Image (tube, helix red, strand yellow):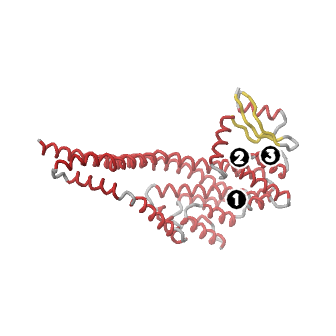
Amino acid sequence: MIKFSYKAMTATGEARNGIIEAPTQARAAQMLQQNGLVVLNINSSANAESFSSATRSLGGRITTQQLMEFSSETSALLDAKIPLEQVLKTQADLCSHPRFKEVLSEVWKDVTGGASFADALARHPKVFERFYSNMVRGGEASGSLDLIMRRIASLLERRQKLRSKVVTAMIYPAILVIIGVLVVSLMMIFAIPKITKLFADTGQLLPVSTRALIGISDFSREYWWLGPVLAILIFGGFKLWTRSEEGKVAWGTKVLGFPVLGGLLAEAETSRFCRMLAALLEGQVPILQALSITGGTLGNAALRKLMRQVYEQVQGGKPMGPVLQTDPLFPELAARMVAMGEDSGELGTMLEKVAERYEEKVSASTERFVSLLEPLFIVILAVVVGFIVVGMMQGIMAMSTSTG
């Protein structure tokens, strides 16, 4: 038997949480439902404890995982015909994250005080993004809030999976870089100076490669502080440059032009744009408002500027697809598919297909990018270490020749 921790609610709206033993998670959920409980969340106790520890380590930060669970659980409770005020009170009572518990309590108080759910969420923009509160607003207006909350949970889950996939793929190249820098630094600062003392005792004229290596080692030991200073100056200059909108747009354009990496970023942003726009449109959010919200959530400033231009053109009565097709920053295939969706009257469906297609492309491009980085880093490390070894060997050979 396995122990499962659960969060649930009774038919009268009372919160319940605890531990239940069952052979499988499905059986545990079935047992709770047989006892008249609406199951909100159920996990093995080990996973729950692990998640709780991770939450505590993050301090007050509210994660995408927590928002996803809140959305999914709220959808389940609303689907069970439990009043919204009661749902929010239950969510606040059961929440184990101090900061999120405080936010949910404030949302519940606002809703019971007469505010709409969307307005209550909008008062916490650092927790609930504009797309979140606006989708909820559309759900309230259409009377399908439970479906919209489920849609939000799905959207957050897809976003988290895509981000995790990219981050996971970049871990190995990052480790290679760190190890390479550490190995070379240790050799230049500690190993080479010890061998250099042997060369100095002979008074022999050393080969050019050996002298260059010794010079680099001496410089590294004496002026090591230049590295951090230059890094700070470059970072500070970059932050100063990108503080202005012109600098952000210029950098965003330059990044999108990078080989392989630029295409990967464009595909990721395209997937995010289409997925979120489709979700907002499905949530009954007007197209202009949806464009404004979606464009503002993009990470690349050049693409954000493009979306502002698209917004202005659509506001003037032009279709979105042809406008996107005129700008090289937006992938041409995606722009064409959006235009076809508008022509057929199935824009939301087409946006979903574009998002799915570009999520697949992001996965493939990430693997391709990593496959290029790994051998590149290995070759660079081999060249650097090879230069050190050759320089040392030539010096040793020259020294042995002179003594011979």
In contact (CB < 8 Å): disc 1 and disc 3 = no
Q: Which mark is residue 293?
A: none
Q: Secondary structure at mark 1?
A: helix
Q: In the shown orientation, is residue 395 left or right of residue 310?
A: left
Q: Amino acid at mark 1?
A: Leu
Q: Secondary structure at mark 2?
A: helix
Mark 3 or mark 2: name the one nearer the start of the chain: 2
Q: Which residue is mark 3?
A: 77
Of the 4 image quadrants, the one containing the C terminus is top left
Q: Residues within 10 Å of mark 2 (few under 14, many from 20)?
A: some
Q: Amino acid at mark 2?
A: Glu
Specify whether residue 40 is in view: yes
The residue nearer to you, when weighing 53 against 226, is 226
**Residue 172, image x, y percentages:** 46, 44
Quick check: 348 above or below 238?
above
Q: Residues within 10 Å of mark 3 (few under 14, many from 20)?
A: many
Residue at the image position 16 percent from the left and 42 percent from the top? 400
Q: In the shown orientation, is residue 297 left or right of residue 208?
A: right
**Gap between marks 1 and 3, in whole Å?**
24 Å
Q: Which residue is mark 2?
A: 69
Q: Which residue is mark 1?
A: 281
**Gap between marks 3 and 2, in whole Å?**
12 Å
Quadrant assignment, res 218: bottom left
Mark 1 or mark 3: name the one nearer the start of the chain: 3
Q: In the shown orientation, is residue 312 left or right of residue 263?
A: right
